[in-house]
Amino acid sequence: MPTRFLQDRFRDVPQCDAIIWQARTFSYRWLLDAIQQWDARLDEHEIHAGTVTTLLADLSPQSVAALLALTQRGAIIVPMTGSMRKHQPAYEAIAQCEVAIEISSDQTISINPIQSDASAKHELHAKLRAAAHPGLVLFSSGSTGTPKAAVHDFTRLLDKFHPPRRAMRTLAFLLFDHIGGLNTILHTLATGGCIVVPSDRSPESVLTAIQDFGVQLLPTSPTFLKLLLISDAWEDYDLQSLQMITYGTEPMSANILAALNEKLPHVTFKQTYGLSEVGILRSKSKDSSSLWMQLGGDGVQTRVVDNVLQIKSHSTMLGYLNAASPFSEDGWFITGDVVQVDGDYFKVLGRGGEMINVGGEKVYPAEVEAVIETMPQVHTAAVYGEANAIMGMIVCARVKLIPGVELSARELTQAVRQHCRNHLSPKQVPIRVTIDPQLSHDERFKKQRTPRA
């Protein structure tokens, strides 16, 4: 049973806090009992090893118990959050789901078979069933088209949590259907720590949870940390319990990282690296203010081909349900992330697919955004490329202004272009700049760089 080691650890700390949700505390004893109740419920609905099962829920004690119960019996789990409801039928068709479990916000549970002509006969599902291993299907964010469905052997993902590590009270910021969110859940529970679920993911709610429940570790994204800086909300909260902030999912700006270290000198900042296809790798930042990191750990190999990071890992997915193989001929996963290398350290510049080729010069959006966002008038910037008959592509930017700042589009364009000329090469300077008061992030707190229609 792949989760036996987890339940053994739960039994070692039955009275300890496992999850804090809606300001209520749930112990490891409660979690063990809830897993047993889910086990009986799954038997009643004939959900067995190999059954492809939707788990539509936001993070809660019941959804965690359901996830663990499904894993221990070897089901193939397709986690979704409430925000994915409008895409649920399409995602279930791609994943060939057979049963849907839904846990509503008030913890009402429904379990229903999915009426579909397509049975779960994909070769990757068959491979999991033949091995008698639980599976996990994770969807990409889908920002550039149909989301890709990555299939994992869940047993391999769980292997890295076997060694005992330090228990911490950890805020659950990343989503339940995201590899980073699942990593937070599994790592925290495997150490006997406590998952703290904020009421929502606004800066005020996150800071309230840190203060009220003694959170020690905050895993989040650079976009959220930028919002935190702009809000200055932390001036009103006691954050002395906070020991570490980990950040990933997108490149971090050196300016933002420097400001964070200045604002929170008692906190260690650590960059993480992971993808839906490879899991979350072990990483080590050069120091708290550095964007350079080491990657690896047991069972992980890295190499760089044409400036693109490639990974061979025990936790790498089996493949996609609905897309071509992203593996090289010799079995390396091609991440698509462009990196610089300095000895044993990597620095992620951005996704190769987001790179803007301006007359043969490669421009990475994150580098231009970092410069624009140092302007006192600018709240957020999103940089992207547009086709151009002469240069191939040109650099464009959407900019959200700080509340209270009033600039015309022409004034903003002139200011941005002049500022960028002082800090960037000529081909990195945006040609077109537009004001976008709606500029924000997706539900995973990643910046959206596509042009607005």
Image (cartoon, rainbow, N blue to C red):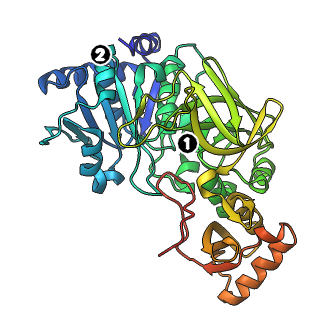
The residue that mark 2 highlights is: 130
| Pointer 1 local density, CA inside 10 Å: few below 14, some 14–19, many at least 20 | few
* Residue 334 in picture, x, y percent from top left: 58, 37
In the rendered image, the residue lying farthest to the right is 422
Q: In the figure, 215 relative to 349: above or below?
A: above
The x and y percentages for residue 352 are 63, 51
Q: Residue 50, labelled with which disc?
A: none
Residue 416: x percent and y percent?
75, 77
Q: Residue at x 71, y 83 (%)?
A: 412
Classify mark 1: helix, strand or loop: helix
Return the residue nearer the eye: 100 or 22: 100
Whether residue 43 is visible to the viewer of this picture, yes or no, is yes
**Which residue position is annotated with label 1?**
212
Q: How many marks?
A: 2
Q: Earlier in the sequence, mark 1 or mark 2?
A: 2
Give the image quarter of residue 214.
top right
Q: Is residue 272 above or below residue 412?
A: above
Q: Nearer the viewer, mark 1 or mark 2?
A: 2
Residue 30 appears left or right of 254: left
Q: Is residue 451 left or right of residue 348?
A: left
Compared with residue 36, is residue 60 higher up or lower down, i.e. above or below?
below
Q: Quadrant of the N terminus?
A: top left
What kind of residue is marked 1? Asp
Image point (56%, 77%), residue name: 437
Q: Residue 87 at x, y = what percent? A: 30, 54
Residue 395 appears left or right of 74? right
Front-lying residue, 190 or 395: 395
Looking at numbered disc 2 in the image, what kind of residue is underneath it? Answer: Ala
Label 2 CA crowd tier, 10 Å (few <14, some 14–19, many 20+): few
* Badge 2 element: helix
- Nearest the eye: 336 or 233: 336
